[in-house]
Structures are given as structure tokens and as C-alpha cells.
Image (spheres, rainbow, N blue to C red):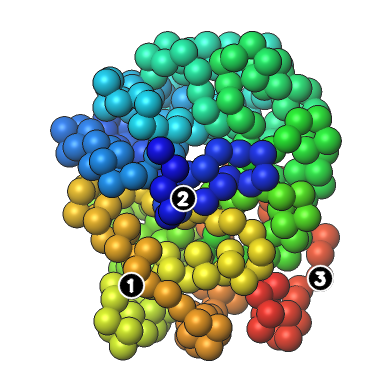
Amino acid sequence: MITASEVRLGKSGPSVFPIALGCMGMGAGSWYGAADEAESIATIHEALERGVNVLDTGDFYGMGKNELLVGKALRGRRDKALLSVKFGALRGPNGEILGHDARPATTKNALAHSLSRLGVDHIDIYRPSRLDPNVPIEETVGAIADMVKAGYVRYIGLSEVGEETIRRAAAVHPICDLQIEYALVSRGAEVGVIPALRELGIAMTAYGVLSRGLLTGAKPSGAGDYRAHMPRFSAGNAERNQPLVDALARLATEKGVSPAQLAIAWVRAKGAAQGVTIVPTLGSRTRKQLVEALSSLDVSLDASEVAALEAAVPASEVAGARYPEVHMAMLDSERSQQTRPAPSSSDASNGQGR
């Protein structure tokens, strides 16, 4: 049943709860170190009971283990969930990312295995995790469109691509949403991507809203936590980023909310200001984290509060890229920004600043 709180995921997509649940950090093979499978499943169940309907996973999370966990959690609850699945990342036995393969045959093969691991007969939103530089996006989207016609996929999404790729993909088949990192300290999408989404009627499912916990003061828990290898958490950068963390905490205290709630509220406010539906995708791994994230829906920010927050936590001051250099080179969304001039300060005031 559609509730008043739901929003439409782009002009071609389904109605969804205004916050999605990202499952990458759950269960065996978690990218954030050790995770409790029982608590992960309980968190998914709690989310579904509270109305959250988009569950995001990827076939390369834990080399399939994450899909198995999500599938287990959905037994008897499939009708409550919209499954968003990424594919295409190639991984070695040691977990390293080897590249991306989004050829049409590979796309359909990956889908078959995801359906099997999840134990479902269709995926609601299917998307390549990154642009395969060796395969035109038209071919990849065309292969997914074949699966839409066959009933194995309901909607097509994209992930971490630039505006040119978005336009080319949308010319082949309607795109419901783009999954991309967007946070107080990760605002590159504002330059060209968000205007393209607005023009084409495509929504954004924003991940990294808390910059993987950086904005809330979280620290890598050990070698198994991939944040230990992320530039913003590295020695030196972590110290340089602490003033941003402290500034967010101060403003959150003044407003009577948590830093996480304030950061999530900022993302939602920016979507409204820029005319694009933005659904934050939160990687809550426990029921406690989930409740805190959902409570952000009660936090509203006016234009002056948004501006004050951006002035206190300027994206230009964050130390370190959002991924290691080798992974940044794989991002079509980043390549598209390199050809654009930096926005002026007046752009920042009207929601278009970096």
C-alpha cells in the first residue's frame, strides 16, 4: 500500500519510502569488518516493518554472500521489498577489485546468479555498478531492457556515471534512478549530474551520506574494514578532517539532533532545493542505527540552516578523495567533472555549488 510518506523514484520508477537500506555492511563478507548476521537480518526485518522498501545490495558484496543474506531475510517478506541490485564488478580471490564487465552476455549471466542467490523470480531495480569502459552503455542497458521485457527485471538504474552516460542510457530505456555518492563533503554531483537528473526526471539514491561514518566520527575497526584503505581515513587526512566532524557535531547539538540525523536531513533538503528526488541509502547495520537514521525524517532544514551547515562543513576542505586513486579512475562520474569549471560562490548559494 502506498503511504503518504513515499516518494516516486523518478518519473519512470516505483513509489518508495524516502530512505533506503544499504546492505553492503551486513553479514559475512561485510566491507566494514565483522558483522552479526542475526542482527543484520533483524535490522532488515525492522526496516521492512517500518515501511522501508528499497533494499540495496550487489552481487560482488562478499562474493555473493550478501545476496544470500538478503534472500534469507526476505523469506516470507518478498512482497514488502524492492530489491536494488548492482552487478559487474570483478573481484579476485583476495577481494581486490579487478575491473568491471558489463557485456550483454555477462549482464544476463550475472542476473541469473543473483536471482538464484536471492531466491526470487525478479529484481526490482538492476544496475551496472560502474561504467565498463569497453562496452557502450547502450549495449548494457539494452541487455537489461531485454530482461525487463522477459519479466526478470522491473526497472533500470545506473551507478556512478556522468551526465553524458546518463543521457545515452536514458535514450535506450527509461532510467528510474542514479546511485551516486552524495554528502556534505562529497558534492561533485551538483555540477552536471543533478541538473541532468532534473531534466530527465531521474531520481538519485544517494549513498555515502555520512561519508562512511567519517562525518559521525567513526573509525575503521581493523584490517577487515575497507575504510582503513580509504584516503579520508588515512593517517594525516583523518586528523585534518576532524575539524569538519567537530563542526557538524556542534551544529547538531545546537539543533538538538545527532550528527547523522543532521547530515541525512541536509541531503534530503538539497534534493528539494534542486528539484530532484533524493533517497538517502543508509548502511545501518543494527536496529539502533536504523532507528536513528529513520528519525532524521523528522528533521527539517530551512535555506539559512542549509547555508550555515555548508559554511561550517565545506566540501572544499575535506582531505582525501572518496576512493583510492585506482578506484577513482574507474568512476565515469568523476571523469565527467574534470572537464567542468569549478562553480562560483554564488552557485553554492543557490544549490549548484560543489
Three-letter residue code for mark 1: Pro
Q: Quadrant of residue 76?
A: top left
Q: Nearer the viewer, residue 176 or 330?
A: 176
Which residue shows up at 31% across the image and 88% down it?
Answer: 254
Q: In the rendering, at what x and y percent does residue 276 appear?
A: 64, 59
Which residue shows up at 36% across the image and 24% down it?
Answer: 78
Mark 2 or mark 1: name the one nearer the start of the chain. Answer: 2
Name the element at disc 2. loop
Q: Nearer the viewer, residue 118 or 239?
A: 118
Q: In this figure, which residue is indicated by the disc labeled 2?
A: 6
Q: Nearer the viewer, residue 10 or 20?
A: 10
Q: Residues within 10 Å of mark 2 (few under 14, many from 20)?
A: some
Q: Which mark is residue 121?
A: none
Q: In this figure, which residue is indicated by the disc labeled 1?
A: 259
Q: In this figure, which residue is indicated by the disc labeled 3?
A: 341
Q: Are marks 2 and 3 in contact (CB under 8 Å)?
A: no
Q: Nearer the viewer, residue 14 or 333?
A: 14
Report how far apart the C-alphas of labels 2 and 1 lie in the structure: 24 Å
Horizontal side of residue 300 vs 304, given as left or right: left
